[in-house]
Image (spheres, rainbow, N blue to C red):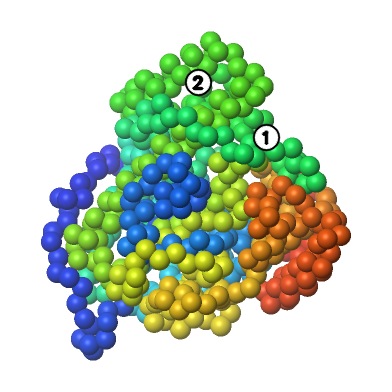
Amino acid sequence: METTKFFLTSVSVLSAAAPAAAKAPSGRPERPNIVYIMSDDHSMQTIGAYGYGLNSTPNIDRIAREGLLLRNNFVSNSISGPCRAVVLTGKFSHRNGFRDNGPKTVFDGSQTTFPKLLQQAGYQTAMIGKWHLGSTPTGFDYYSVHVGQGTYYSPVMIEPDGRKCYEGAYATDLTLDKSIEWLEHRDTSRPFCLMMHFKAPHRNWMPAPEKMAMYEDTTFPLPATFYDDYAGRQAAAAQKMSIAEDMRLEWDLKMLGMEPSDMKGEKLRSELDRMTPEQRAAFDRVYLPLRDEFERLGLQGKELAEWKYQRYMRDYLKVISSVDDKVGEMIDYLKKNGLWENTIVIYTSDQGFYMGEHGWFDKRFMYEESFHTPFVMSYPAAIRRPGREIEALTQNIDIAPTLLDFAGVTIPADMQGESMKPLMTGEKRKIRDGLYYHYYEYPLPHAVKRHYGIRNSRYKLIHFYYDIDAWELYDLKRDPAELHNLIDDPAYSRVKAKMMKQLKALQEKYGDTNPTNDGYYDPREKKVSSNH
Ligand code: SGN
Ligand code: CA
């Protein structure tokens, strides 16, 4: 493996003033460039433009202000690899074959993806950052991807000519710098599609040196459902993603030496070992006094749970702040180089995340916080009336068809999503009545039971299965926090019957007609069920 000392290249040095986007020789407008920015586990609740007031993200907000924001955008299986496979293929997990992050699952890179189709249509394509699909990226002229989840410090990247360790680099900075470097060396006569996938803000929320002290004086409001008792919700009661119970003092909260026998403590130490002495000193300056104070306080019970929540929020938001800075540098680069008008810039996340709602971190459930995912986009050449919010139900299966549509490339008939282009360019209409969801990864981490379900603009119906058989029904208008399971409420029997029917119709439409026979590998049984 080659080791590279990585020196951050300043964007302003690289950028020379470039002419504004020209018309193609045919006189037709140029095909748009695409910068698809996706982070890992970035919740809607922590993007300024969504209005929760927890933090500010001025640069991500610029994309929404100069373009649009999707209010009701969802995933189809709230977990990293599966979401990434859905984005590339425009197909649900049961169709693209990548159902889970489990050790046996590898993305079949021979299938059709939107970057491949763009490449065939003359686009230059690149994939930089978190890939997390097991197989070597296909459909890209260039790639530089993390090994698995990657590390925050001194990441090892897989590139066409082998693995390289970028010693001293911070992952978020590296993703931006590699992206700009690729743009600088591209063929300017052809359009490009760049997928820029931040590792951040994935667990263990390791901040950049200059952000270590940020938010240390801020106290965040405890979510109203932090002490949820999960009454009437068996699967919610069985999870292992509680801030109070499952968040680790060393790995997650960086209290060095507080859990000497915990395997995950090892993981923190190995991440710290990847730092330069200066980076390590910046960490120690902030986290060692916090550890000493924590030891002195000896917190228990609710006090300890709330202390963990504050630490979690601070670290998570420090990491987000770096992401937002780098999004800003990309916007500035595009503007300085005359590319902004004719480039589709998307900022989204692989899925949503819990910021203490129901007492949780992590994702996986079809409940709103992890089912929802943020999505803002700008494309001044085609999106009139900047700053628009779109209320229609959209889903990550729609991304591939939408980008192909904008690029003027035929959308394959077997892609399962819909093009959002009409919505985005001003037509007021809905593209679907209901969203379908199917999550498989049980019993792997966090013990979230397998489930599938449907959500429309008012109600949600979920079936948890495998080693449980539990149905849940929510009225999102009356109970947006999803605390009251109405499945046995006689007042909702007609709603229930209607939702059951709609669910069946969606399963037929999308070809997931035998959902409990899901073929997912169970490491405890060491066998795979028949239709895998
Ligand atoms: C790791 C994390 C989990 C997380 C999964 C999946 N544990 O296993 O908390 O849910 O990744 O995340 S950790 O101790 O290794 O941090 S995903 O976003 O890649 O799907
Ligand atoms: Ca993720």
The answer to which of 368 and 285 lies nearer the viewer is: 368
Please state which of residues 47 and 348 is positioned toward the viewer in this rendering. 47
Residue for badge 2: 256
Please state the horizontal and vertical placement of residue 519, each as a whole percent of the image.
Answer: 74, 61
Q: Is residue 199 visible?
A: no
Point out the image quarter for the C terminus.
bottom right
Whichever of callouts 1 and 2 sits on the residue coming sooner in the sequence is: 1
Q: Amino acid at mark 2?
A: Leu
* Quadrant holding the N terminus: top left
Percent across and percent down for residue 258 are 56, 18
Residue lying at the far top in this picture: please name it. 296
Image point 13% across, 59% down: which residue? 16
Q: Residue furthest bottom?
A: 26
CA gap between label 1 and label 2 equals 27 Å
The label nearer to you, 1 versus 2, is 1
Res 227 seen here? yes
Q: Which residue is mark 1?
A: 227
User: Picture coordinates of residue 274 (x, y %)?
Assistant: 40, 32
